[in-house]
Image (tube, rainbow, N blue to C red):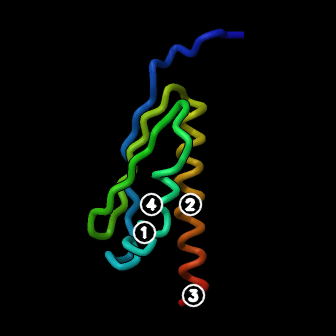
Amino acid sequence: MIDESPLEGVKSNIAVEFDNADQAKIVYESILLEFETAPDFRSSMTIELDESRILIKIDAEDSTSFRASVNSAIKWINLALEINNLTN
């Protein structure tokens, strides 16, 4: 078993494109608190709204925490979209 990961860290910028700026704003406002309060032991995430895109920046210590951050972001966005679709 390898004691230490050969990675010094994983950083990524992810852009999620929406149909329009209104939809992006609804999702952004719905998930902003999740990003601000997510535990940041081994990774950190920030989120920005750019017209019809949400920009996510992830800085993780290792691939496992990076994957967990990506999965969380996708889960939150997906849930916000599903709830929005139910109410429309």
Residue drawn where x is 57% and y is 87% of the image:
87
The residue carrying mark 4 is: 32
The vertical placement of 71 against 25, above or below, is: above
The type of residue carrying mark 3 is Thr
> Which of the labelled discs sits on residue 87, or is there none?
3
Task: Say which label, 1 or 3, has the lower sequence index.
Answer: 1
Residue drawn where x is 41% and y is 66% of the image:
28
Tag 4, which secondary structure? helix
Circle nearer the viewer, 3 or 4: 4
The residue carrying mark 1 is: 29
Task: Say which label, 2 or 1, has the lower sequence index.
Answer: 1
Circle nearer the viewer, 2 or 4: 4
The type of residue carrying mark 4 is Leu
User: CB of mark 3 within 8 Å of CB of mark 4?
Assistant: no
Task: Say which label, 2 or 4, has the lower sequence index.
Answer: 4
The residue carrying mark 2 is: 76
Q: Residue 58: percent from the left, percent from the top?
A: 43, 41
Spatial CA span between label 2 and label 3: 17 Å
Comparing 17 with 58, the one in front is 58
Circle nearer the viewer, 2 or 1: 1
Q: Residue 54: percent from the left, percent from the top?
A: 37, 60
Tag 2, which secondary structure? helix
